[in-house]
Image (cartoon, rainbow, N blue to C red):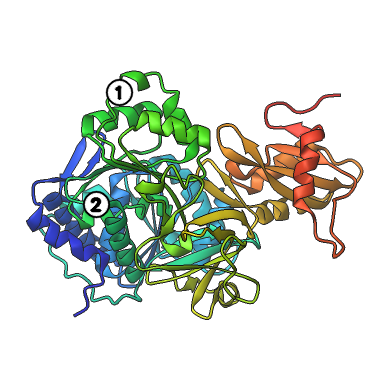
Amino acid sequence: MSTANVAAMLAGNARRFADADALVFEDRRWTHRQLAADVEALAAGLAAEGIRRDARVAIISNNVPEFLLLSLALSKLGAVFVPLNYRLTAGELAQLLRHARVEAVATVPEFAALTDAALTEAALTGAGAGPAAAVRRFALEPIADGWVDVRAVIEAHRGARVTDADLDDAALHRIVYTSGTTGLPKGVLLTHGNVNMNMHAQIVELGLRSSDRILNFAPLYHVGGTDLPGFGIWHVGGTMVLHRRFEPAAVLRAIETERITGMVMAATMLDMVRRAADVAAADLSSVRWVIYSQVTSALFAVARELFPDARLIEGYGLTETCSALTYLDEAHMRSKQGSVGLPVSWVQVRVVDADGNDVLVGDDGEVIARGPKVSPGYLDDPQATGAAWRDGWFHTGDIGRFDADGYLYIRDRLKDMIRSGGENMSSAEIENVLADHPLVLAASVVAAPHPVWLEVPVAFVIGRPGLEAESLIAHARQRLGGFKVPKEIYVVDEFPTNPSGKVLKRSLRELRSSARPDWTYDRPRRD
C-alpha cells in the first residue's frame, strides 16, 4: 500500500504528539489528537455528501482553520482541492471554476455573495461546471440556508474513521492558479509527491522540530501559506498559529504570547511591523528565522534590529516548484546579501542560455530547475506545459546568475510579472482587459515602484479620440480584482519599440519618471 497521502502524517502525530498544540486560531486550539479527529470526521462527512476520490473542490476563503481541515480531509479521501484568490472578481473566479471542473465550492460568509455570483456566471457563460445549483456548497463558517456547514458536518460524524486513500507520488493534491505571460491563468498541478518532498526540504533547510511554532498569515490559497513551510510544521509535530489576515499589531502580540519561532513575511509587511505602535515594547526574542524576499539593504537593517538573533532568509521559489527553490544560509546572510542562496534539498538549479547550455559563472541566463518537488505541468494546457518543461527541466522564465561560490542571484524576469504586496499578477492579463475598451488601440502595462506594496501596475495606452482615463479605469474595475487595476494611466501617441516592433517596457518605465499621468489612483488629473 502506498503512503504518499499527505494526510497520513495525522495519525502518527495523534499518537506521538497527542496533547501538544497543532493549530491555534483566535480563541480556538487543536491538539494533534484533536486535529486528526476533526479531519477524520470531516472526511467521513464529505464522503456522505458524495465527495469521492479525484473530485475537485474549490475553496474561496481567507485564512480560517476549516480551510486547513477541509484540505486535509479531501487529501485523506484522495480528492483534490482548488484554492482560489478571493480578491478576484466573480467573472475571473467563474473562469477558473469552469476550467477546474469543480464539483463543490467552500467559502466563508464574507465571500458568499462573491462565490454565488461566480457560480452563477460560470453556469451561464459556457460549459464546464454545469448548473450552479448542482455544485455543492460548503460553509467553512456558518452561512444561511443552502450551504452545508462544515463545523456541523464534523460534529455529526464525530468518532468516524476513514481509511486514507491509497495514493502514489503522482496523485494530484491540488490545483493552484497562477498568471502566465499570456495573461491567461494557468492551473499548476501539485501532487502528493511534490508536497511531501517540499515538507522534507523545509524540515531540513529550516531545522524544523516539534517545539517550533510558526505564525502563518500568508494566504492559504497561495503556496506561501500552505508550503512555506505550511504543512511541513505538522510533519514534525509542531504548531501553526493561524491568522485570518496580516495585521502588524496582531503579529507582535502573537510572537510574544505564543512564542513564535518562525514566519514568512513580505518586505511590505516587515516595514509595517517596524512602524507598529507597540513594536518597541514587544518581546520578539523567540523568533529564530524569518523568510522574506526582495528585501532592500535598508529593510535588512530593520529586520536585523527587530529580530537580532534570527536567521534572515532571502528565498526564491514559484508555485510550479511548490514554493522555495533556494534559501540563503545563515552564515552568508550578510556577506551574500542580495542573493537568494543555494538550492534546497532534493532540487537541482541551473542557469542556461537560449540553447539550454550552462552559462559561465557571473553570466546571466534563464533559471531552470528539476526535482521531486517540481510540478509535472499545467492543467489541460499541453502547449504551456511543453514550453515550460523541456528535457526534464522546468524553465522558470526568470533571469539569474551564479557567483563563484554557487550562490544564485535573480537579475530580471522573462515573464513580465508584477509583484505587489505579496501578490503576483501578469501585465499581459491587464493589457488584454484594457485593450478590450472600445476606444483603446493598444495598451502596455509595467511595474512601478511603490513605498508600501513594492510594485504596482501602471498603464500606457494609445487611444482613439474621446478616450477618457476615468472611463478606462471604470472598465478595468469591472473586469479585474482591485489589486490588478492600474494605479496610473498615461495616454500616449505611440509606444517605443525595437526594430521588430516589440514594445520596450524599459523605455516606458523611463518615460514615467518624466511624464505626468492622465489619471492616478490618488487623484485624477483636472486641467
| Residue at the spot 29% in from the left edge and 27% down from the top edge | 253
Q: Which of marks 1 and 2 precedes in the sequence?
A: 2
Query: Can residue 179 be spotted in the picture?
Result: no
Left or right of 417? Residue 247 is left
Where residue 222 appears, as percent x and y from the top left, is: 43, 52
Out of 52 and 515, give the one closest to the viewer: 515
Q: Nearer the viewer, residue 215 or 87?
A: 215
Q: CA distance from mark 2 to mark 1?
A: 24 Å
Looking at the image, which residue is at 28% across and 65% down?
A: 75
Residue 324, by quadrant, is: bottom left
Task: Assign the N terminus to one quadrant of the image.
Answer: bottom left
Taking depth in this image into account, of 261 and 175 the one nearest to the observer is 261
Q: Who is closer to the viewer here, 181 or 341?
A: 341
Task: Give the image location of residue 293, x and y in percent.
Answer: 48, 46
The answer to whether residue 350 is above or below residue 83 is below
The three-letter amino acid code for the residue at tag 1 is Ala
Counting from the top left corner in percent of width and height, residue 31 is at 14, 46
**Does 421 sit left or right of 52 as displayed?**
right
Say the numbered circle drawn on residue 190. Answer: none
Label 2 element class: loop
Give the residue drawn at x 18%, y 40%: 29
Packing grade of label 2 (10 A; few <14, some 14-19, many >=20) is many
Would you call the spot at circle 1 few (<14 residues within 10 Å), some (14-19), or many (20 or more)?
some
Q: Amino acid at mark 2?
A: Leu
Q: Secondary structure at mark 1?
A: loop
Q: Would you name the residue on which mark 1 appears? A: 282
The vertical placement of 401 against 515, above or below, is below
**Which residue is depicted at the point 81% across and 32% down?**
516
Residue position marked by numbered label 2 in the rendering: 208
